[in-house]
Image (cartoon, helix red, strand yellow):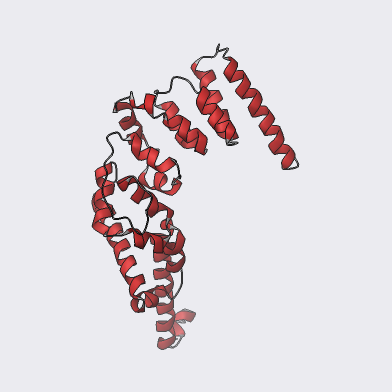
Amino acid sequence: MMMRGSLFELRNPKTRHNEWQQVQSTTMVDEQVSTYSKYRGFAAAVSSCASFESDRLVDGKLSEVFAKLDVLEQRQVECKSISNFDDVATVLRASNLTARDLTYLNSPLLDGLWKVVTGVDPDEAVELVIDKPVYKQRMLLRLIAPKSYADTIEFLGLLKEHWKTSLREDDLDFFADMPLVEVASGTGHVELVQLFLNCGVVEDVDDALWRAAGNGHLLVMQELLNWAHRSDPNIHDPALRDAQSCLERLSKRCFAAAGL
């Protein structure tokens, strides 16, 4: 008696071939989405289209910029981990991406990489001119003010342990002229605020508190107040009391506006 095979095995071979092609096509699209999705913007949107590969073959500009993105991806793999300014500059320069390409791709992550390397926001009239900062903290400053690039901060791992070590080793006098905790507080980056506080280079948070309050960043205010009380449980700073009162008033307004 003939053994009964699976339904898939009993189908016409041509049908099985077509189904396998469809599976392969779906897998390729998924891989493209996972590769380019981190760039967001146009790069993520167009790569998620089912027709992306065919569009890339016939559209010269699309083919050109994604070829550069592929070089960027490959150089990242070769670097294994991007852990300093030189790595970032090497990877970006190797890709040959231009400011015009970045305008076309509209990617917050790529814009941030450009800002790290050049010190300026990408503009079509600007070429890639490497401007290595003296202090590592300036890499962070470039990504948090005046425009923030959260995607790039996450991509480069600037909140990870090896960056904390670098911050401790750098000249701490830098913070006297460029208090990043104040800048981060004003822009509302809670994780960055935590990073600076945990590095042990912050003496007080009075100015940071008012920067956060002025922009309505309640979570940042709470983090700063918690740090101040952990640093000195017996602290009786009038400025901190005022900040606590301000936080409570702002919180009530937010709850009232939300109907809670």
Number of marks in picture: 0
Q: Identify the image quadrant of the N terminus.
A: bottom left
Q: Position of residue 88 (x, y in %)?
A: 28, 47
Front-lying residue, 87 or 253: 253
Front-lying residue, 10 or 152: 152
Q: Position of residue 69 (x, y in %)?
A: 32, 61
Q: Measured along the vertical axis of the image, is residue 41 above or below residue 46? A: above
Q: Measured along the vertical axis of the image, is residue 15 above or below residue 80? A: below
Q: Identify the image quadrant of the C terminus.
A: top right
Q: At x 43% / y 76%, what residue is drawn?
A: 51
Q: Is residue 165 left or right of 179 when viewed as pictured?
A: left
Q: Is residue 41 left or right of 249 when viewed as pictured?
A: left
Residue 150 visible in image: yes
Residue 158 visible in image: no
Q: Position of residue 256 (x, y in %)?
A: 74, 38
Q: Measured along the vertical axis of the image, is residue 8 above or below residue 121? A: below
Q: At x 37% / y 42%, what residue is drawn?
A: 157
Q: Position of residue 60 (x, y in %)?
A: 33, 75
Q: At x 41% / y 88%, what residue is drawn?
A: 14
